[in-house]
Amino acid sequence: MALLLNDDDMNRMLEEIRPEGEQYIGKAWGTITGGTARILSLGALSNVSCYVGVTDRSLVIAVMGTFDITQVSRGLCIPFDRIEQVKIRQGLLPSQKMIRLKTEGKSLKLSLIHNPVTARVKNQKEGIQKICEALAEPAGFGTPGLNPR
């Protein structure tokens, strides 16, 4: 069992739930915050680790198991055209980005940090940048911030 998050597990897990015919343009490790974990019925009141990927049409999230981070406990695929609002802001740490989005009336909050201690993900910083750019740009979202569809 892996003790640290890593590229091999990230690639394997995200490939399992990648929409057919789409290719990833950015991948990173992240955390789903506690409020979202309750909404998704992940059985956690605190943060849950995940791998996040974006294609040119979708946001893909592989939520990891609580006790075994090598297994996907839930996979989410959200097409950009179903995202109603996106807000991207700087986190408390200089290397942290906070992403909040609304889809179908539900809110999803992600924390992405490019120098995580518990992960050995290469190109984490570049992956976060690609994810933020993709979420800020698709289908008229415009610049980062509160972007209603």
Image (cartoon, grey):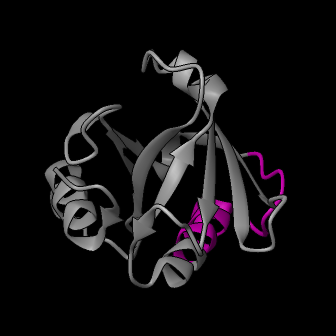
In this rendering, is residue 43 above or below 99? above
Please name the residue shown 67% across and 66% down the image.
136
* Horizontal relation, residue 98 to residue 49: left or right: right
Please name the residue shown 83% across and 51% down the image.
146
* Horizontal relation, residue 90 to residue 32: left or right: right
* Horizontal relation, residue 89 to residue 77: left or right: right
Q: Nearer the viewer, residue 58 or 37?
A: 37
Q: Nearer the viewer, residue 102 or 46?
A: 46
In the rendered image, residue 138, in percent from the top left (x then y), is placed at 57, 64
* Horizontal relation, residue 23 to residue 12: left or right: right
In the rendered image, residue 75, in percent from the top left (x then y), is placed at 29, 38
Q: Nearer the viewer, residue 138 or 27?
A: 27
What is the span of residues highlighted in magenta in the rendered image?
130-148
Please name the residue shown 62% across and 68% down the image.
132
In this rendering, is residue 36 above or below 15? above
In the rendered image, residue 142, in percent from the top left (x then y), is placed at 75, 67
In this rendering, is residue 142 above or below 33? below
Whether residue 147 is in magenta: the answer is yes
Please name the residue shown 15% across and 51% down the image.
16
Decide if residue 107 is in sight here.
no
Decide if residue 72 is in sight here.
yes
In this rendering, is residue 141 above or below 76? below
Whether residue 114 is in magenta: the answer is no
In the rendered image, residue 88, in percent from the top left (x then y), is placed at 75, 58
